[in-house]
Image (tube, rainbow, N blue to C red):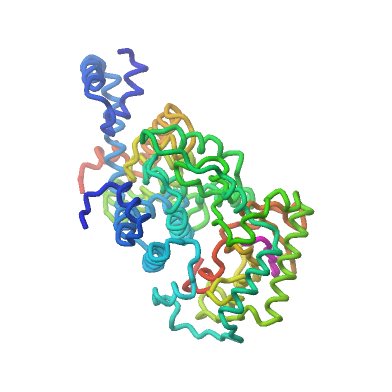
């Protein structure tokens, strides 16, 4: 065994990943190579030092996840969370004063949403539906997962969640759930392409949601979270009969200084498609519009040429969860 | 419920409608995943958001999950990609080369290096932790994620290759650089293996 090979194997050795035979060869080499031994000792010493960093204390929020899991397990349809119900179940937001401006019978809301969904630009669900049935699971180390991983760099931006490991490309691209009958059959190709198309879709979405709100189909809820440095000063959501948010706006300190309102409009799959940021910063008042496609990828920002508004400052999924989330203080 | 079930068995049971199986997965992996995210991003509130989002995606995608790749690989792929996506945007927004600014906004390693106490002080637990964190934060992200996954999350190199989407030899070479970088930074901060030997106080 030469030095190069030995050096490469030192890591496997340190982490116990070396097959026994290889390990014996390496030990034999180490016995006769002081340089390699020194390398090995450096590795062990550095690891020993770093291991003194214990685990991070876990944050709260487990209750929401367990409630989500229970709901998913119970319904067999995990995408249809009732966020309102979840939050209440978790006890997180139950005590917060909420002004429900108007209520709407769920049945009517459901009908309205179906009609509305049928008119909306189709979400990515078409791709999911179109995906062929998954091939029968074979050997545990099948090639599917690496293939998907290799394909990912093309699909960047917000499509950050990888597919379930066995997913195929088409399937992989569809974190969105299959739609209710009526939308699932719509071809994705029907959606207007490019930025102009996205602008159209975005404007249509905002118009549609405003119309629904005016018609009383969506309930407006507001929160004034307890004031704290770095926290939101106001939140607003348009909730449907299931507690799902179709619009979520929050006002609070902006990343670049000053204060801004981030106003999110969500599509039927619960993805933010249009975000309007309206704020006052060190250089005065500004207003930005950010567009996302049905897969959650950022496709345009208006005015152009500015650095993208940080996604971490936005609630790109699950506006209701963001609306009910506990206040976060401090920066 | 037996707790020696594999992650994959638990995931299948969760698919079958057993919410308790998910709870076991959560107990097993939530803490390590959070440590990973905190140290990867250097930002606790952001890590909390990412952690929540990661697990919500696990719940949401569970019906389509198939036990071909390990659950852990999948979980860390989700977590890592969510974090990487945010880091990319952040890096674009601020032209700041360090994507893990410390509490003061400056490089944590630099901040701590100022007037770094000797090994005796550094050996004290309360002072040691920020130094180790600073050493991690000083690593380039692609090295840091490999080190975090292997050292703290216990993910083998082959799985790290899947998670990060680079070949296994690249993973190992990043790991080598990471260990080398950590060693140097720790020495600079007075907590390196060499410094500890020089200090000789042990705990």
Q: Nearer the viewer, residue A256 or A267?
A: A267
Q: Residue at x 30, y 53 (%)?
A: B28
Q: Is residue B103 visible?
A: no
The segment highlighted magenta reads A272-282
Residue B114 appears at what percent x and percent y?
44, 50
Horizontally, residue A173 falls left or right of residue B103, namely right
From this view, report whether residue B130 is shown above or below residue A182. above
Q: Residue at x 53, y 72 (%)?
A: A231
Report which quarter residue B146 is drawn in. Answer: top left
Horizontally, residue A207 falls left or right of residue A91, namely right
Q: Main secondary structure of the magenta part?
A: strand
Tell how many labels.
Answer: 0
Q: Residue at x 65, y 57 (%)?
A: A309
Residue B135 appears at what percent x and percent y?
40, 44
Q: Nearer the viewer, residue B2 or A114?
A: A114
Assess whether residue B82 is covered by the magenta stretch: no
From this view, report whether residue A221 is shown above or below residue A141. below
Residue A192 appears at what percent x and percent y?
76, 52
């Amino acid at each position: 065994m030469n030095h190069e090979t030995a050096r490469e194997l030192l890591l496997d050795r340190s982490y116990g990943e070396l097959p026994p035979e290889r390990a014996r060869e390496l030990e034999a080499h180490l016995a006769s190579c002081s340089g390699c031994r020194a390398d090995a000792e450096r590795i062990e010493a550095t690891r020993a030092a770093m291991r003194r960093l214990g685990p991070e204390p876990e944050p709260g929020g487990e209750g929401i996840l367990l409630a989500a899991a229970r709901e998913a397990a119970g319904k067999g349809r995990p995408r249809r969370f009732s966020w309102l119900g979840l939050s209440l179940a978790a006890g997180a937001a139950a005590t917060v004063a909420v002004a429900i401006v108007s209520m709407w019978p769920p049945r009517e809301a459901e009908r309205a949403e179906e009609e509305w969904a049928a008119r909306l630009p189709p979400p990515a669900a078409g791709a999911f539906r179109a995906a062929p049935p998954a091939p029968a699971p074979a050997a545990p180390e099948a090639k599917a997962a690496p293939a998907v991983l290799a394909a990912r760099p093309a699909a960047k931006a917000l499509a950050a969640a990888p597919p379930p490991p066995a997913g195929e490309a088409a399937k992989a691209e569809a974190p969105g759930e299959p739609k209710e009958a009526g939308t699932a059959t719509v071809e994705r190709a029907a959606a207007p392409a490019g930025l102009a198309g996205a602008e159209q879709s975005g404007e249509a979405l905002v118009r549609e949601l405003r119309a629904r709100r005016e018609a009383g189909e969506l309930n407006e809820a507001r929160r004034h979270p307890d004031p704290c440095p770095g926290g939101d000063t106001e939140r607003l959501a348009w909730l449907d009969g299931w507690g799902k948010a179709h619009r979520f706006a929050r006002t609070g300190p902006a990343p670049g200084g000053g204060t801004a309102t981030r106003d999110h409009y969500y599509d039927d799959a619960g993805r933010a498609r249009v975000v309007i940021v309206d704020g006052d910063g060190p250089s005065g008042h500004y207003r930005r519009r950010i567009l996302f496609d049905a897969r959650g990828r950022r496709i345009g920002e208006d005015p152009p040429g500015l650095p993208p508004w940080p996604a971490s400052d936005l609630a790109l999924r699950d506006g209701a969860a963001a609306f009910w989330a506990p206040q976060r203080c401090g920066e | 419920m037996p707790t020696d079930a594999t992650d994959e068995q638990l995931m299948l049971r969760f698919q079958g409608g057993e919410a308790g199986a998910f709870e076991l997965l959560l107990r097993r992996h939530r803490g390590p995943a959070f440590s990973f995210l905190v140290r990867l991003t250097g930002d606790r509130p952001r890590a909390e958001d990412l952690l929540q989002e990661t697990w919500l995606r696990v719940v949401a995608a569970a019906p389509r999950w198939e036990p071909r790749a390990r659950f852990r690989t999948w979980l860390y792929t989700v977590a890592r990609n969510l974090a990487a996506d945010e880091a990319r945007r952040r890096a674009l927004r601020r032209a700041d080369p360090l994507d893990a600014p410390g509490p003061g906004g400056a490089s944590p390693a630099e901040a701590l290096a100022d007037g770094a106490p000797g090994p005796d002080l550094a050996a004290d637990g309360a002072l040691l932790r920020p130094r180790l964190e600073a050493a991690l934060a000083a690593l380039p992200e692609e090295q840091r994620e490999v080190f975090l996954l292997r050292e703290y999350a216990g993910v083998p190199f082959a799985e790290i290759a899947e998670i990060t989407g680079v070949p296994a030899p690249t993973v190992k070479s990043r790991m080598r650089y990471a260990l080398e970088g950590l060693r140097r930074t720790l020495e600079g901060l007075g907590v390196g293996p060499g410094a500890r030997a020089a200090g000789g106080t042990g705990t």
